Image: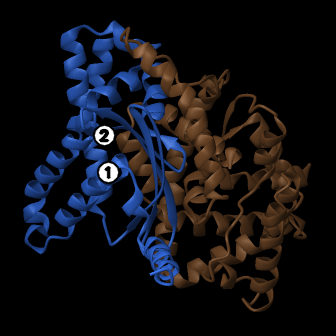
Amino acid sequence: MGKRFPFLWLAGVLVLAVLPWSAFAGAPTEQLKQTTDKVISILTDPDLKGPSNAEKRRALIRKIADERFDWNEMSRRALGHHWKKLNEEEKKTFVKLFSQLLDRTYMEKVEDYSGEKATYTGETIDENYAIVEMKVLTSKNVEIPVVNKLKKKGEDWMIYDVAVEGVSFVNNYRTQFNSLLSKSSVSELLAKLREKVSEK
Amino acid sequence: MKRKRRILMLAGLLWLFAAGSSSGDGGADPVPYAFSVGFGEKVVLAQASAASEEGEIEAVSQEGILPDPLEPINRAFFVFNDRLYFWVLKPVARGYGFVLPEKVRVGIGSFFRNLAFPVRFVNCLFQGKLEGASEEFGSFLLNSIAGMGGLFDIAGDAGVKKYDEDLDQSLGTFGFGPGFYINWPFLGPSTLRGTFGSVGDGFLDPVNYLDSTGTALAVESVNVVNRTSFVIGEYESLKRAALDPYSALKDAYYQNRLKKIRE
């Protein structure tokens, strides 16, 4: 028996070394990965290919995105201290329009999917907040760093910000909203947002 | 004066900030980056969650705010650059990309990158990145000799990391603030510090030592058109997602700079 132990120990170490890192990743990475995999499976599904299936594809992706993105949190953060200037009705309208805009942007990015690979490179959890870092390798062999910020809601980790190449969506929109709201009213902002979303 | 103008042209690369940032800079060591993000974030997250109790979330950090005292002029030049892109640069880059196969354009890009090696080397040294300096030096030798003067990125293909360091980042690392936002005509987003950085880096770029301003401009134009041919569509999608494209570009430029300085 005594002789076997070192062998078993070594085998154990080897197994650990061979297991992919993701096996040890926490819940935020796991959940994010599930979402990404689901989206990729829709984009690569031969039954859903082609322009005739675009609507169907988008509806499916939108549903998956809704389960992982916290549109409300994103909206609050993007508006920053302006958020409290909105009444309940305006808040609702804002969240709806802003999520449609983000959704469209996200959709147009993923529609170009051509076999990019995502690797998960890091995870930091601080109670109810988490940061999951990944690298997306494009078909042209360019690595794009992406940082996802998530907030825990029950058992679900929900994305409230995404930063690509260091450029955070929430910060970028906050700069824009700040600039717009320094010159115009909330209702004008909502009108502008509505117009933007309806752009073809 | 002539040289100065030529050197300023170099900041044209900044216009294509998106190109620069996605053209394969592997970034610095990911580990310290992870820590720096994680660490800074902790404080910010705590503040944010406390603030959200009152339904109020303040700006994430002072660092993320770039003063813009020249906004009216900057906005005018934004419109100018926007038209320049859609009316001149984009059609030219499209035609260029149509005529030249991607492999050739990649080679031309590698050639220019290899040529600007002194900029990266010196700035790696400025920032105490000895490993970066030695890897850039090795890549330069290998690509210049075995890669036919830099047309082939042999080192990059073999997985050698790239260190896209510049003087703006060095100055940032030394603790100099960005000053304020400047949106140059032709050259695009920069800051006061970024402008000094580009001029300084210009002294290390061999293109600026060509015998005439005309030649240098022509060579630089090829570089800009070549770069643009790879990123057609990126500026368009930024504009499509933005409610205020001017602010969106300013913020994207600055956030990307902050990240590069952190690394």
Residue B100 visible in this rendered orientation of the protein: no
Cα gap from disc 1 to disc 2, whole angstroms: 8 Å
Q: Quadrant of residue A85?
A: top left
Q: Residues within 10 Å of mark 1 (few under 14, many from 20)?
A: many
Subunit of label 1: A
**Residue at position x 61%, y 24% from top?**
B71
Which of marks 2 and 1 precedes in the sequence? Answer: 1
**Is A57 drawn above or below residue B70 in the view shown?**
below
**Is B52 drawn above or below residue A59 in the view shown?**
above
Name the residue that disc number 1 marks. A32
Subunit of label 2: A
State left or right for residue A39 relative to residue A8. Answer: left
Question: Which of the chains is brown?
Answer: B
Question: Residue B123, position in %: x, y?
Answer: 83, 56
Question: For this rendering, which residue is in front, A70 or A115?
Answer: A70
State left or right for residue A72 relative to residue A17. Answer: left
Question: Residue B194, position in %: x, y?
Answer: 75, 42
**Residue at position x 17%, y 47% from top?**
A62
Instruction: Tell whether label 2 touches label 1 (CB within 8 Å).
Output: yes
Going by the numbered disc 2, the residue's amino acid type is: Trp
Question: Which of the chains is blue?
Answer: A
Q: Secondary structure at mark 2?
A: strand
Name the residue that disc number 2 marks. A157
Q: Secondary structure at mark 1?
A: helix
Residue B179 visible in this rendered orientation of the protein: yes
Question: Residue B111, position in %: x, y?
Answer: 71, 77
